[in-house]
């Protein structure tokens, strides 16, 4: 069937085009079921108890945005304890490898060299407003990859201190994931010319061109791509939506057997292999022709290695600073202005050995200023249970002395109502308690 998943796996995540029960934006901010709202609130409380989340204070912001927390909940099918484990592992990994420092201080040329080996943002969005990336694997020949890895391991591209267990070549890759989550997604979120404009964009749509790639080349790339895929799935969950594989050779079923073992079932369910006859029709279901590269039947002037051909609508929404008219080479990220009404883009990284921090432009902020209704709802429910428990104690206190519970039993009932998690603590695996 045209456009069918390679291997359909039932999941409660964004795999559809918006019309099916679980398609985007279901499960995303502004489109949560009551159960999902409750899970988000419980997740915040759980993380807060573990010292991993701080609520927004007056005039400030929370330590982590709701849309970030939701990525972990969707990835772990809304099971709070499972989401906590992945979130904690990610926070520990980020701290051990100083991801913030890495992105702030990575050499611009090293960043661009890494960018040329991985998916490129085309500068365009799909019909839902999600950024579109193009990846042409044929450019990753063994000589190119070997030279890159040798250079990456012999020189440190940033001032970050690492844990020593994550190779330098992969840390550079994660600078690109930081760019996705801190540059491309916030930019696309700020654009209001889309359905569900109140919902922040936390995904990407990917066109993966595997044409002109031999079985030997796939084999040579196997360990390189497996390591990258494993870490990305672990630490940047739910950043992929549709993945369209184009130009698959006759032996691709063998390659697919390797690839699907690198990803969790949720990610596998998002990968679609298109025949030559399906490419144009299927891509146009998700992407306007003007935003599809010409090589795949569209109208967009864009080749792999090109700088992003930025959507004119995006450029019109931007207020440029100091003569800039385009986005910079190298790392950049958006930060909220002091009044929280705009996002300001800063180019960072090191150029010619010197750190840069230059304001490039600004755009109206898409993000809500108050994001705590889920926590409030959960707390309200907890308080109601406490009140009910206290009323129960009052009733017991006037009953006959033979039926009257002990002081210890009364305290236990109120404590269990006040902190529901405490009653379940002993049922948690040791790894969750730690």
Image (cartoon, grey):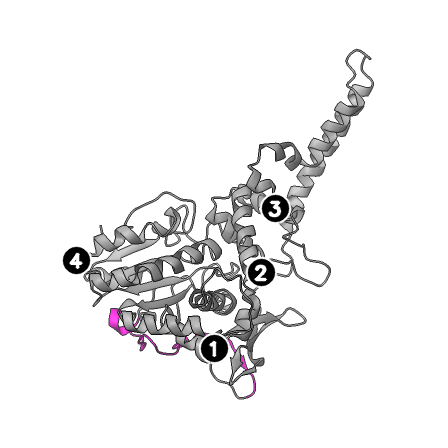
User: Which quadrant of the figure has residue 403?
Assistant: top right
Residue in the picture at 40% in, 50% down: 23
Q: How many numbered marks appear?
A: 4
Whole-percent x and y of residue 362? Answer: 56, 76
Relative placement, left or right, of 236 versus 2 is right
Density class for disc 1 (Cα within 10 Å; few <14, some 14-19, many ≥20) is many
Q: Which residue position holds label 2?
A: 95
Residue shown at 21% from the left, 62% from the top: 216
Q: Is residue 320 left or right of residue 49?
A: left
Part of the protein shown in magenta: 293-322
Q: Which mark is residue 250?
A: 4
- Secondary structure, mark 1, is loop
Residue positioned 34% across, 71% down in the render: 291
Which percent across, then down, holds residue 288?
Answer: 33, 67
Instruction: Give the residue number, with chain letter if any, for mark 3.
Output: 41
Q: Is residue 130 left or right of residue 89?
A: left
For mark 2, give the secondary structure: helix
How far across and down, in percent of the image, does residue 95 sit?
Answer: 58, 60
Q: Of circles 4 and 3, which is in front?
A: 4
Q: How far apart, in angstroms, are the residues tagged by discs 4 and 3?
A: 48 Å
Query: What is the distance, in whole Å, between disc 1 and disc 2 at their CAs?
Result: 22 Å
- Residue 42 counted in the magenta span: no
């Amino acid at each position: 069937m045209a456009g069918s998943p390679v291997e359909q796996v039932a999941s409660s995540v964004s795999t559809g085009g918006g019309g099916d029960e679980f398609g985007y934006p279901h499960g995303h901010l502004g489109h949560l079921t009551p159960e999902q709202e409750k899970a988000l609130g419980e997740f915040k409380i759980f993380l807060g108890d573990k010292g991993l989340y701080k609520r927004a204070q007056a005039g400030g912001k929370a330590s982590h945005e709701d849309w970030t927390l939701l990525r972990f909940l969707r990835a772990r099918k809304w099971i709070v304890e499972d989401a906590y484990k992945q979130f904690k592992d990610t926070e520990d990994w980020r701290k051990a490898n100083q991801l913030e420092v890495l992105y702030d201080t990575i050499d611009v040329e090293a960043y661009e060299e890494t960018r040329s080996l991985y998916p490129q943002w085309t500068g365009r969005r799909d019909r839902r407003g999600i950024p579109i990336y193009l990846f042409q694997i044929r450019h990753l020949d063994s000589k190119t990859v070997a030279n890159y890895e040798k250079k990456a391991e012999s020189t440190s591209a940033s001032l970050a201190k690492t844990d020593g267990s994550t190779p330098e070549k992969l840390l550079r890759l994660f600078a690109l994931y930081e760019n996705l989550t801190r540059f491309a997604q916030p930019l696309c979120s700020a654009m209001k010319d889309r359905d569900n404009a109140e919902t922040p964009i936390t995904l990407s749509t990917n066109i993966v061109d595997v044409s002109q790639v031999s079985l030997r080349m796939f084999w040579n790339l196997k360990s390189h791509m497996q390591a990258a895929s494993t870490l990305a799935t672990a630490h940047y969950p739910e950043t992929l939506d549709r993945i369209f594989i184009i130009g698959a050779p006759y032996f691709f079923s063998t390659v697919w057997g390797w690839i699907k073992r690198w990803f969790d079932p949720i990610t596998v369910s998002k990968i679609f292999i298109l025949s030559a006859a399906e490419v144009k029709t299927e891509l146009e279901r998700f992407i306007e022709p003007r935003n599809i590269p010409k090589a795949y039947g569209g109208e967009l002037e864009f080749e792999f290695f090109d700088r992003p051909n930025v959507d004119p609508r995006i450029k019109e929404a931007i207020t440029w600073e100091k003569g800039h008219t385009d986005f910079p080479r190298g790392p950049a990220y958006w930060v909220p202005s002091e009044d929280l009404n705009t996002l300001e883009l800063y180019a960072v990284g090191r150029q010619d050995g010197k750190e840069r921090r230059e304001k490039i432009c600004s755009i109206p902020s898409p993000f809500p200023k108050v994001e705590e209704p889920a926590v409030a709802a959960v707390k309200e429910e907890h308080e109601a249970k406490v009140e009910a428990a206290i009323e129960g104690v009052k009733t017991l206190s006037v009953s006959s002395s033979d039926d009257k519970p002990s002081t210890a039993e009364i305290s236990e009932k109120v404590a269990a109502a006040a902190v529901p998690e405490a009653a379940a603590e002993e049922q948690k695996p040791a790894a969750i308690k730690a």
